[in-house]
Amino acid sequence: MTGDAIGSWRSPGGLEFRVSAPQAYRLDDATIAATFRAQLPERVADLLAIAMEVYAFDRLSTRSSRDPFGRGWCRELSPVLAVRDVDFWSSSEVAGTITGLLDWLTDDYWEPCFVPFRGGRSLAETQGTLFSLRPGGTAAVACFSGGLDSFGGTAIDLGEHDDLELVLVGASGTGRARSLQRRLAEALRERTANRVQPLLITANLVHAKGRRQDRQHRSRGLLFLSLAAATALVADVGEVRVYENGIGAVNLAYGRGQVGAHMSRSAHPKTLAAMQHLVDLMDVSSGIRFTLPRVFDTKASIVRRIPDQFADLIGTTMSCDTWSSNRQPRLAEGERYRCGCCSSCVLRRQALRTSGLAELDGRERYRADVLAAEVSDEDAFALRLMLGQVAALEAATRANEPWEAMITAFPQLVDARDGLLVLGDGPDVEDRLVGLYRRYAQEWRQVQAPMVERYLGQVAA
Amino acid sequence: MADGDFYSRNLAPKWRKVGNTLGGGQDLGVVCGLASEAFAESMRLSRGVPGLRELCHAFAAAARDGDRNAWLATSEQVRRDARHHPNTEITAMAGQALLETDAGKRPGLSDGELHETLARASVDGIAQHHLARCRQSQLAAAFATVGELQARERDVISGIDTMALARELLRHEDGQGFRAPARRTASAGTEHLIGRTLRGPS
């Protein structure tokens, strides 16, 4: 499907801008229908259109970081969203759920306006055949980015459950990301006798070159989860798995200097809980459960649990925030450097080093080596923030009442606990979260690097 | 998922001086006095804590009746109405943490005392927010470990008269006319710096 990004947005300074970008995006939703030889139900097609239009609109409306009090962060966004079932999406409960989810994901003030869809029905809505190709047996849909967590979680579950079939949904805006996802998914499929079905979907803005764009694109989580949900609904599969380690999923602020959605909430338990509620309201199937199977694991513990039969693929995964963009220099053999500076690169290196894969870490190509003796302040910015967080986590998890100490230091942890309770993660969530952060802090102590030792110092008695 | 985590690097007026004096090993009383003044300036310039009154009422009701759902609903609406103003976000988070940690201690307190409790937590959180941002830009080299630095930051927050600032905040929710309490410590002279090694920002 292609579509427009139309509407208006207001900057915190009160300036109003109109967005009128016809054919602003392309979403290859036909892949979902074609893969399962089924039609997209009307409301599912609407969900995908909403998610993509919101994403395009979000990216074409810029934030400002100039105000020292952070008031340039929140925008007032009023996109015009074309849907087939206007009455349903405009109802107070559904519209309220969408607005609440978007406010939470992006920290903006959303006021979408739903209007009747005037275009023709897309191929995905009309093509159907006599034969369905839905997965059989025990099946689930999994979000698959080509990163270490999504690969590791997939590999662990496939290794532990012989009858499990996984549909891996990867969404990407660049050919590089799609190629990586394809390579990994195909390798997993070959090694599991076809228990993996890749479903790689192109989702990108078109004609966006030269336009000012928001670089945070916080609404991306809605797009990825909507694609996974749509796949599950069409394939008649009852579970969407998001394989993200707990540290990354909850994504606590590094310190008090960050507020709200400064940290991405794409895989946050509360996001998944809100998404589940939205899909329930759509009433298209017997229901989907969103799960975070590795939420009580650190990235290092995911790496340690990857079965031997898949371990050689770890080096193929990519974690860097910017590797697939043109911001990183190209290597001679056509690959690109990982930046080495972003928190995703730093956490990957920590995980590899503390899970016995220091040799692999040494072979990977980073533009900047922040674990070396000499590193610039600018390159080590994210590492310093992370170490500040680790010091605070160490102090809190050692307190007599660790949960109270944790939420005093990181109040946003309450949202994570509440989200996990909705997702059905049991009454001992608080203890398990404390355990997760305690292990994470301990792992950092095993990283031998000058800056880590300098910042964390000796373990307090 | 760490995609594009955002960290604001510019400091609000007067906080750079707080960071410099803290990093330079100045007397704690001096740092606290400067932090108080910087806080007041931030309140005036950032228009206080939009929605503080509603948050206070919801907090008092939740602390008395234990109705956390009502608090959550109000807090979400206030944050939205305030266009996710950072001071409002920090205050809402502080209220959430207070309700989790000290829920049992509140039923006997009056409305006014409960409002002060939240306002004080708000002051504490906003001051920490600005102080933590000084850390990245200036303080990295001044302390042996990041834990030592964080302990010093806690000392500064404890040394600020948060109750006086909280009462001022309740009087001037929109920040207009907000004044810091009078300094208890005079500004330090420069004589003590003679013969001493200076530690500058990183």
Image (cartoon, rainbow, N blue to C red):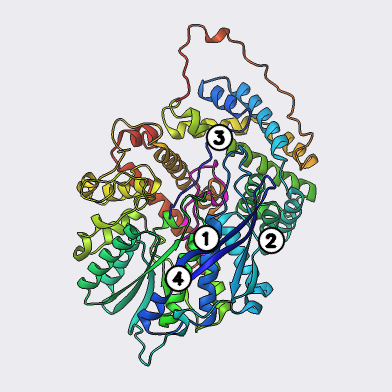
SS label for mark 2: loop
Q: Main secondary structure of the magenta part?
A: loop
Residue at image x 19%, y 63%?
A: A308
User: Which residues lie in the magenta part?
Assistant: A250-271
Mark 2 or 3, nearer chain start: 3
What is the C-alpha distance between the residues marked 1 and 3? Answer: 29 Å
What is the C-alpha distance between the residues marked 2 and 4? Answer: 39 Å
| Label disc, if present, on residue A227 of the rendered structure | 4
Q: Foreground: A325 or A241?
A: A325
Q: Are marks 2 and 3 on the same chain?
A: yes
Residue on which the image places disc 1: A56
Q: Amino acid at mark 3?
A: Asn
Residue on which the image places disc 2: B66
Q: Check contact, mark 3 vs mark 4: CB within 8 A.
A: no
Q: Foreground: A262 or B181?
A: A262
Can the viewer see residue A421 in this picture? no
Does B176 sit above or below residue A5?
A: above
Q: Foreground: A189 or B122?
A: A189
Q: Check contact, mark 1 vs mark 2: CB within 8 A.
A: no
Q: Amino acid at mark 2?
A: Gly
